[in-house]
Image: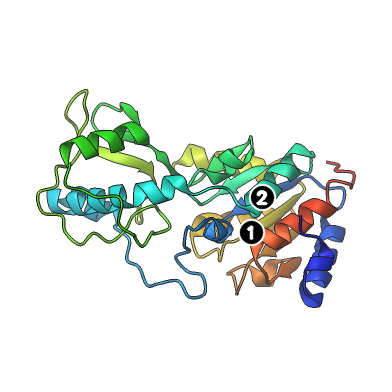
C-alpha cells in the first residue's frame, strides 16, 4: 500500500495539505479516464494520448455504414476492455467509502471498474458499456450476451489479435466489409450501447443524482480528470458555490486548477492509495 513516504517530496507535501483540508469531512469523489489508465484503458486527453476522433451520436444514427464501423470496432475492443481489472486507485476509493469518508463516486468512465472494485454508490455520468438497449422498444441486453450473438453472426471476426484499445472500449477496425450489425432480438429495432456519445446530453436525472451526491457532501475530490467535459466543471461550480474545499489529483493541468483548494500533480493510483491510508483514521463528519 502506498503511503506519503513512497511519494516524492512535492507530491507528499501537497498530499499532506489535502489530508488537512479533507479531515473530518464527507467527501464526494469525481473521477475521469486518468483513474483507469493503470488498468490498461487509455485516456483521451492525458499526456501521450493518441489523437482520436470518437464517433458522435449524429454519425451513429446517420447510416448503416456508420453503425457497422462502430460495432466492428466496439466488438473488437470488448474482450480487452472487459478483461481490464480495477487498479489501486479504484480500490482506494472503495476503501474510502467503506471507511465512511467518501459518500460515493461520480465517474465519467464507462468501464464499470469502480463497481468491480467494491464501490457501492456509483453515479455513471456517461453510462456503461455493460448494457445495450433497443432505441425502439427499450429492451435492455447484457453486453456479454450481445457479444456472443455478434460472434455467431460474424464468425470471421478474430478477437485474438492485438488491438489498440480506446477509452470507450473500441478500436479502429481495419475492415467493416460483410459485418452483420446486431439488432434487437425482440422487435428488430436499432441497438445502441448504454453510453453517452459525443454530442449527446447526459440524462437530466443522472446529473441530478450527481448533484445530490455533491450537495450531501462537505468536500469534493477529483481524480484523473482534466475537466474538459462540461459535466465535470459544472459539478466543480456547484461545490464552489457551496464553498466546499476542492482537491484535484491529476497529471497535468485541469480546467479547475484555479478553483482548487489543493492540486496534486501526480498519478491517481499511488496518490489515492496514500490518501486512503491517511484518511480512514480521521473522524469523518458532516
> Can see residue 110?
no
Q: Which residue sits at x=87%, y=60%?
A: 20
Against 18, residue 207 (above or below) is above
Label 1 crowd (10 A; few <14 / some 14-19 / many >=20): many
Q: Which of 37/219 is in front?
A: 37
Query: Given contact means CB atoms under 8 Å apart, are the residues at marks 2 and 1 in contact?
Result: yes
Q: Residues within 10 Å of mark 2 (few under 14, many from 20)?
A: many
From the image, tell me which residue sits under label 2: 29
Judge from the rendering whether residue 39 lies leftward or rightward of residue 13; answer left or right: left
Question: Is 68 rendered above or below residue 260?
Answer: above
Q: Is 25 above or below relative to 49? A: above
Residue 202 screen position, x and y as percent: 44, 46
* Colour convention: rainbow
- Position of 23 with respect to 106 (left or right) is right
Q: Position of residue 200 (x, y in %)?
A: 36, 51
Residue at screen point 56% across, 66% down:
226
The answer to which of marks 2 and 1 sits earlier in the sequence is 2
Residue 173: in sight, yes or no? yes
Query: Helix, strand, or loop for circle 2?
Result: strand
Residue 82 is marked as: none
Location of mark 1 (residue): 223
| Nearer-the-camera pick, 155 or 16 | 155
Please state, as top left, top right, bottom left or bottom right, where the C terminus lies in the image.
top right
Q: Position of residue 74 (x, y in %)?
A: 30, 50
Alpha carbon separation for disc pair 2 and 1? 8 Å
Residue 84 shown left or right of residue 264 in the figure:
left
- Secondary structure, mark 1, is strand
Q: How many marks?
A: 2
Residue occupying image coordinates x 68% and y 43%: 94
Amino acid at each position: 500500500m502506498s503511503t506519503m513516504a513512497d511519494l516524492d517530496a512535492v507530491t507528499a507535501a501537497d498530499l499532506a495539505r489535502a489530508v488537512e483540508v479533507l479531515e473530518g469531512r464527507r467527501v464526494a469523489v469525481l473521477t475521469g479516464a486518468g483513474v483507469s489508465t493503470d488498468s490498461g484503458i487509455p485516456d483521451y486527453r492525458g499526456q501521450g494520448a493518441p489523437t482520436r476522433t470518437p464517433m458522435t451520436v449524429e454519425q451513429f444514427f446517420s447510416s448503416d455504414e456508420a453503425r457497422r464501423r462502430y460495432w466492428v470496432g466496439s466488438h473488437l475492443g470488448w474482450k480487452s476492455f472487459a478483461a481490464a481489472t480495477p487498479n489501486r486507485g479504484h480500490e482506494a476509493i472503495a476503501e474510502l467509502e467503506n471507511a465512511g469518508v467518501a459518500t460515493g463516486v461520480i465517474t465519467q468512465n464507462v468501464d464499470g471498474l469502480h463497481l468491480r472494485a467494491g464501490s457501492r454508490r456509483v453515479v455513471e455520468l456517461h453510462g456503461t458499456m455493460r448494457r445495450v438497449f433497443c432505441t425502439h422498444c427499450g429492451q435492455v441486453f447484457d453486453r456479454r450476451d450481445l457479444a456472443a450473438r455478434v460472434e455467431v453472426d460474424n464468425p470471421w471476426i478474430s478477437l485474438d489479435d492485438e488491438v489498440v484499445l480506446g477509452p470507450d472500449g473500441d478500436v479502429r477496425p481495419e475492415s467493416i466489409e460483410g459485418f452483420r450489425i446486431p439488432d434487437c432480438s425482440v422487435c428488430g429495432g436499432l441497438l445502441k450501447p448504454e453510453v453517452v456519445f459525443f454530442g449527446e446530453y447526459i440524462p437530466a436525472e443522472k446529473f441530478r443524482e450527481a448533484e445530490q451526491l455533491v450537495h450531501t457532501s462537505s468536500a469534493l475530490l477529483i481524480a484523473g480528470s482534466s475537466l474538459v467535459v462540461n459535466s465535470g466543471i459544472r459539478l466543480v461550480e456547484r461545490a464552489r458555490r457551496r464553498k466546499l474545499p476542492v482537491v484535484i489529483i491529476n497529471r497535468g493541468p485541469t480546467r479547475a486548477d484555479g478553483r482548487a483548494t489543493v492540486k496534486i500533480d501526480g498519478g491517481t493510483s499511488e496518490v489515492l492509495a496514500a490518501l486512503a491510508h491517511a484518511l480512514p483514521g480521521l473522524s469523518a463528519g458532516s
